[in-house]
Image (cartoon, rainbow, N blue to C red):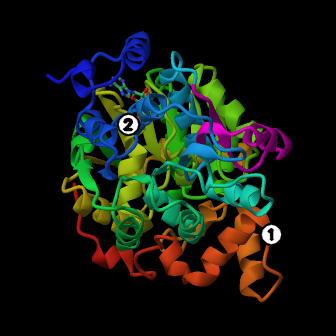
Amino acid sequence: MTQFSDLGLAKPLLKALAEKGYKEPTPIQAQAIPVVLQGKDLLGIAQTGTGKTAAFALPILQRLAEDRKPAPRRGFRCLVLSPTRELATQIAENFKAYAVHMGLSVHTIYGGVKYGPQMKALAGGIDVLVATPGRLMDHMAEKSATVSGTEIFVLDEADQMLDLGFVVPIRKIAAQLTKNRQNLFFSATMPSEIGKLAGELLKDPVQVSVAPQATTVERIDQRVLFIEAQRKRPLLAELFADSSFSRTIVFTRTKRGADRVAKYLNAAGVEAASIHGDKTQGQRERALAAFKAGEMRALVATDIAARGIDVNDVSHVINYELPNVPEAYVHRIGRTARKGKDGIAISFCADDERSLLKDIQKATRQTIPSFDRRNDKQLAAAAAVADKLVPADRHVDPRKADPRNDVPSELRRKRNRNRSGGQAAQGQNQGRGQAKKAAPAQNQFRGPKRQAAPAAKSWTPLD
Ligand code: AMP
């Protein structure tokens, strides 16, 4: 078995790894670290949970330390672009932990917080900057950041960048980078638009690919519960009556849905909070911290908010609503069964979600064991009580649901304004607005796959 010391990592890094309790490299680390240490470009196909952050952070820190020099003023020696604030924070925390014996500076830049402290941090130069594209573009426009001195450029979760409409901002940022740089590109999936972007950014990359999605899926005990849409809430409360649901992530398709489910759970006596794109940074951080600390049994999340979140020992994942794309199912259930542990994923499936279930089973090449909880009198009675606790939401056919419901409202408003010929938005929203102009909506989001097909006719029983 390969050891960290076999990979050519320097002593301060080996010491930090030992302190973190990492015993041996994960497959992506074993493959990627030597390549990055040699200064080569890398294309990594890997999802969160595989140890991909350390796969790029460790060799980057070593390269920066081997060639110590001051970071350029208002610039950074290494730039890591992350799609979300949560992931940016997590990546920076990893860098800091590994760099603890190296004296290199690590900072984050993302939206939703004040500019002042970020400008101050940027002024003197930073060794490693982890940023979301929108806020970095703001700083570049204000001349408080310059990317021209960047030696190593990392693009993380590229496929999610596409979902969020960040591809055009990324191209703009990359256009200002020096040609003589090292590029590392990570994505869990490789849709054609992302393959194209990788082709533009990378020079003769070494490709490493780990954990085909099915292997994560195989370790998870998955079940589907068929249930009437309006009885999902009492079914959820029934599950939480079991105390083994100690740290559970509940997924909904929309922000509003996440809020309602969290409200209902609290009313039913289960401590819960929701996280999604419309929550402030402070709200998201508090919810995550309480969940991580075990103060809350349930975190109700949308796909975008939850992706990349690294919480250990998630006991269960519940798909309160099935996602519109099978990849999202794999990402969701991958929140449990981390670090080689097992996990349980339970998916609620209403009649109008059966075509989504079929897509998921096809994509993951499996038949998920299913149980029929429809026509349950107890649940029917409990549903009436639930409606009194928190009035039920209007039911939206999942095949007609707009996947952009998961995109922060502010971003959507700006996009709409741009489309209607309004003034181009400034700063962070400028880049995003232009992303919208440059590509039609269907390129920005993985939309619902089909138009209101009669579900009952096309469905073949699975159980
Ligand atoms: P990532 O895929 O980078 O989000 O990492 C997933 C989790 O695995 C994080 O909590 C890391 O701290 C942890 N991790 C990364 N590399 C190792 C390793 N070699 N041994 C044990 N844990 C690791």
The residue wearing badge 2 is 49
Q: Is residue 149 left or right of residue 368?
A: right
Indicate which disc residue 426 carries. 1
Q: Quadrant of ligand 1?
A: top left
Residue 212 visible in this rendered orientation of the protein: yes
Q: Position of residue 390 (x, y in %)?
A: 72, 47
Q: Outermost residue toward the bottom?
A: 421
- Marks 1 and 2 sit apart, C-alpha to C-alpha, by 36 Å
Q: Which quadrant does the C terminus fall into? A: bottom left
Up/down of 274 relative to 14, above or below? below
Q: In the depicted view, which residue is nearer to us: 182 or 270?
A: 182
Q: Quadrant of residue 424?
A: bottom right
Q: Position of residue 440 (x, y in %)?
A: 55, 84
Q: Is residue 148 left or right of residue 60?
A: right
Q: Determine whether the beta carbon of the residue marked 2 sits less than 8 angstroms from the nearest atom of ligand 1.
A: yes
**Picture residue at 53% right of the left edge, 64% below the top:** 174
Q: In the depicted view, which residue is nearer to us: 258 or 210?
A: 210
Q: Position of residue 25 (x, y in %)?
A: 27, 26
389 inside magenta stretch: no
**Picture residue at 74% right of the left edge, 81% below the top:** 418
Q: Which residues are magenta?
A: 104-129
Residue 382 visible in this rendered orientation of the protein: no
Q: Which quadrant does the N terminus fall into? A: top left
**Picture residue at 30% right of the left edge, 65% below the top:** 359
Label 2 crowd (10 A; few <14 / some 14-19 / many >=20) = many
Indicate which disc residue 317 carries. none
Nearer-N-terminus badge (1/2): 2
Residue type highlighted by circle 1: Gln
Up/down of 19 relative to 187, above or below? above
